[in-house]
Image: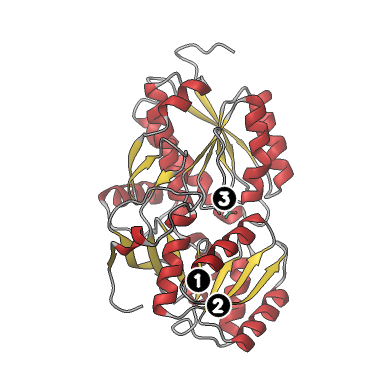
Amino acid sequence: MISSHHDPVRIGVLFSESGVTSVIETSQRIGTMLAVEEINASGGIDGRELQMIFRDPQSRPSLYRTLAEELIVEEDIRVIAGCYMSSTRKAVIPVLERWNALLLYPTLYEGFEYSRHVFYTGAAPNQNSVQLAEFMTRKFGSRVFMVGSDYVYPYESNRIMSDLVLERGGEKVAEHYLPLGATQSDFDAVVRLVRDDSPDFIFSTVVGEGTAMLYRAYREAGLDPARMPIASLTTCEAEVAQMGAEFAEGHITSAPYFHSVDTPANRKAVEALQAGFGSSQLANQCLEAAYFQIHLLADAMRRANPDEVESLLRALPGSEFEAPQGRVRIDEQNHHTHLHPRIGRANTRGQFDILEQAKDRVRPDPYLVSHTLQDWSVRTALRSSA
Ligand code: ACM
């Protein structure tokens, strides 16, 4: 199709509105819509409106693949913003490669992947796992109990965490996986094992609806987060809102962004978010990545031909944006993003107190070629107690 100077520039939006990861993906859809609103309010893409075409893949990997292909083939879309679970991203990649389309992926993930057709704007393991391993072993000890959902991100993240903990002389006490549809009694049973094993901390790679059940089981077992917290890369403000702040309080998350980040860009974005989507709406790392990646895209589209994938593939690498977390940059070599690692502890308000943060943004190293903890050694401690 040949577009005219007045046609909208259309992008696909592929986040689940139903199913196990719908809460976090709804927040990613909101981050996307907020950015699109801002871009259109300031003139769109050289006068052309940026328009979103939505599909709901219902948290089912095969439906992500079907709907991605539908967006590309039937709607003639070349750029899709979407996906949360790594299983869904991996389902979409062959379709992108077949039809020469792009995915902007705003979710932390396990690394060890590169596709020319994907831009990864969430944290890679050297921007969250390395920091979490270093922090937890320093503050709590190195005997770790692992519990995750049963799919690729938890398997691979546990492998990475095992290596990092073993490097520091630690020990993996246990490794358990529960299906995405696990029930409260499944999580109660896992927490009984935690109690028996008495680790120094729990590393959770549980995602979606199970997250609330894990933290609930932990609290109802009478365990103490000040002594043996749950450490996670995925439990953020959206999951905390779903479970209730009292269940998350005291537990630890490693992420490049929290709602509580104190930057001018974050104050502005949060104000716009709450004006548009309700005064109680909190941002989170996935909403923020969904937001800034659309600004990076719009900026690249203004410098390129917005309807041509090859032109966008030249314009996006190296591009920068003053994001709520700090200035971010898409790496020229690996399509991942330079981000600002932080460690947060959940508080009584359903937000995170930021305990430590990297002094500078950290270059993405998705294959952990040089995971020496050195990037993190230039951290700043923001609070003395942890
Ligand atoms: C994830 O599956 N990348 C959270």
* Up/down of 232 relative to 295, above or below: below
In the rendered image, residue 176, in percent from the top left (x then y), is placed at 67, 71
Instruction: Decide if residue 31 is in sight here.
Output: yes
Left or right, 302 with respect to 236, comes to left
Asked whether the residues under the numbered discs 2 and 3 touch, taking CB atoms below 8 Å apart as contact, a structural biologist would say: no
Asked whether the residues under the numbered discs 2 and 1 touch, taking CB atoms below 8 Å apart as contact, a structural biologist would say: yes
Left or right, 9 with respect to 299, comes to right
Query: Which numbered tag is attached to residue 274?
Result: none
Q: Which is nearer the eye, 269 or 191?
A: 191
Q: Which residue is denoted by mark 1 in the rendering? A: 165
Q: Earlier in the sequence, mark 2 or mark 3?
A: 3
Q: Which residue is denoted by mark 2 in the rendering? A: 171
In the rendered image, residue 339, in percent from the top left (x then y), is placed at 38, 50
Q: CA distance from mark 2 to mark 3?
A: 34 Å
* Up/down of 278 relative to 183, above or below: above
Of the two numbered discs 2 and 3 in the rendering, the one whose residue sits closer to the viewer: 2
In the rendered image, residue 110, in percent from the top left (x then y), is placed at 56, 54
Q: CA distance from mark 2 to mark 1?
A: 7 Å
Q: Which residue is denoted by mark 3 in the rendering? A: 25
